[in-house]
Image (cartoon, rainbow, N blue to C red):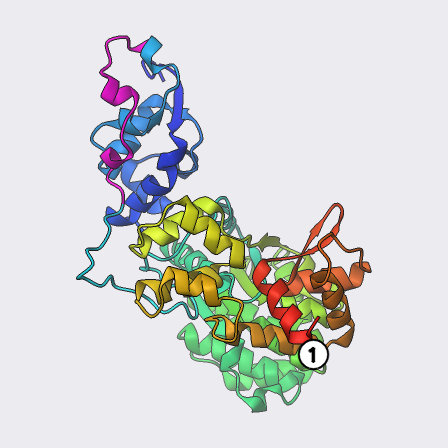
Amino acid sequence: MQGSRGSIKLRPNCVSHVQTLLLRNGFFSQADFAEHLMMSQATVSKFLQGKKVDRSYFQRICEGLGIDDWRSAADLPNFTQLEPDMPKALVEPDIERINPLPIAPPSSSPVLETPEGEVPLSSPFYISRPPHEEHCFAEISKPTALIRIKAPRQMGKSSLATRILDRAKHQGDQIVYLSLQQATQQAFTDSDSFLRWFCNSVALRAKHSINVSAYQNLVAMVGSNLGTQEYFETHLLPDLRQPLTLGLDEIDIVFKYAHIYGDFLGFLRSIHEAGKRSNILQNLRLVIAHSTEVYVVPIDLNQSPFNVGITIELPEFTHEQVQTLADRHYLSWTSVEVDQLMAIGGGHPFLLRLAMYRIANRDITFDELTQTAFTAKSIYTNYLRRLGQILTEQPELADAMKEVVTVDEPVSLKSEIQYKLEAIGLVKITSEGVICSCELYRQYFQNFWGV
């Protein structure tokens, strides 16, 4: 842009603080902020990631965030050469000048959220993980979109799925959220019962008056899978007269039922593929969230939606994201405290949020947490017991994990075993072999097995 005088970026030590300003200014997503500025979301995203943007855009974004002097946030190593008369205070700005998140006074208590379940849309405790959100928001606008979000348990899958559904709603879609936890035991009797429950549940949530006789006739003629697909195409979707974005959460549950999951996943794959040929079915978009722990059981990938659409693998939080999360809990931590906490549980979102919640709620001090994290008094005990139960039920995995936690160097394991342990979240696979994901797991399982 003429007169922009080049591209600039945020100072590295300003990035996490500037990201908190979005919420403080009433913007719950980068997309909302970009729309407010009448600017592309990609430009806003680059700014917030500390990447270079055109100087005029940089100034507009700073103004939108309430940063009075954009120079105080800019990374300008040669600034004194460009502006010889610039006061020293602007060449070496104080981070406080960009309005960091205020620390709550000792006498007050910040509004906290228990770190269980999905993070609400309006919550300040949701931490975005670029570029995953932007990728999903772009994908959900496409016909026949299928987004599969996978990660170990409590990594934020449901929270991201909720935000994708919200984006679909704002683009004019009818949205339906369905957790398979809501299915009754009777629904798992057989494939016919489960698909009938599924079709009825989607129709109910979409406020579609289901034509029971039409559905039953279709199923009687061609079977539950094709009959349910045909009902979507000839009755449900035409009745809605708008695209339907269907969010399926806790899909892991179906894997407990060997007599059902093949037919159900085959149905999802079939209806997605049929959208490429049907003008009606292309209005169905799917968002599927599941734990990678499902890979511990055998799955026929050719009969599932697990190798179609796009796959989002949620990573752990970075150091910068952990610092942002601490700021939003009104914890006046430096990099020292962030490093200490990450040395225990890595960047696992739930482990981090649980620690910050308990400390901010004054249930425990930071020192007490670090001193007891590996003991019977650990705040993580219940979480760790569940992992121990998984290994108890999988002796081959338990034997491999024992080897991992008893040595200090990477371990070589059979491919099938190492990928299953990685799917549970217990190990990381490096070029040199398998290592324990974090010190918390290492010390817990050493004590668990007495090794």
Query: Which residue reaches farthest left?
Result: 107
In the rendered structure, the answer to whether residue 64 lies left or right of residue 422 reads left
Residue 155 drawn above or below residue 296:
above
Give the image location of residue 136, x and y in percent: 50, 50
Dividing the picture into quadrants, the one containing residue 275 is bottom right
Q: Residue at x 45, y 59 (%)?
A: 352
In the rendered structure, the answer to whether residue 311 lies left or right of residue 77 reads right
Q: Residue at x 49, y 51 (%)?
A: 317
In the image shown, does 52 or 221 lie closer to the viewer?
Answer: 52
Give the image location of residue 75, x and y in percent: 37, 25
Question: The N terminus lies in which quarter of the figure?
Answer: top left
Residue 337 drawn above or below residue 66:
below
Give the image location of residue 69, x and y in percent: 22, 27
In the image shown, does 92 or 242 lie closer to the viewer?
Answer: 92
Question: The C terminus lies in which quarter of the figure?
Answer: bottom right
Q: Residue at x 45, y 69 (%)?
A: 177
Confirm whether residue 275 shows in the render: yes
Confirm whether residue 271 shows in the render: no
Quickly name the residue at label 1. 392
Which stretch is magenta?
Answer: 82-100
In the image shown, does 394 or 277 lie closer to the viewer?
Answer: 394
Kind of residue indicated by mark 1: Thr
Give the image location of residue 298, x and y in percent: 76, 71
Is residue 325 located in the magenta-colored stretch of the structure? Answer: no
Query: Which residue reaches farthest right?
Result: 414
Structural crowding at the residue carrying mark 1, measured as other residues with C-alpha within 10 Å and reported as few (<14), some (14–19) or many (≥20): few
Residue 402 drawn above or below residue 285:
below
Kindly state the secondary structure of the residue where label 1 is placed. helix
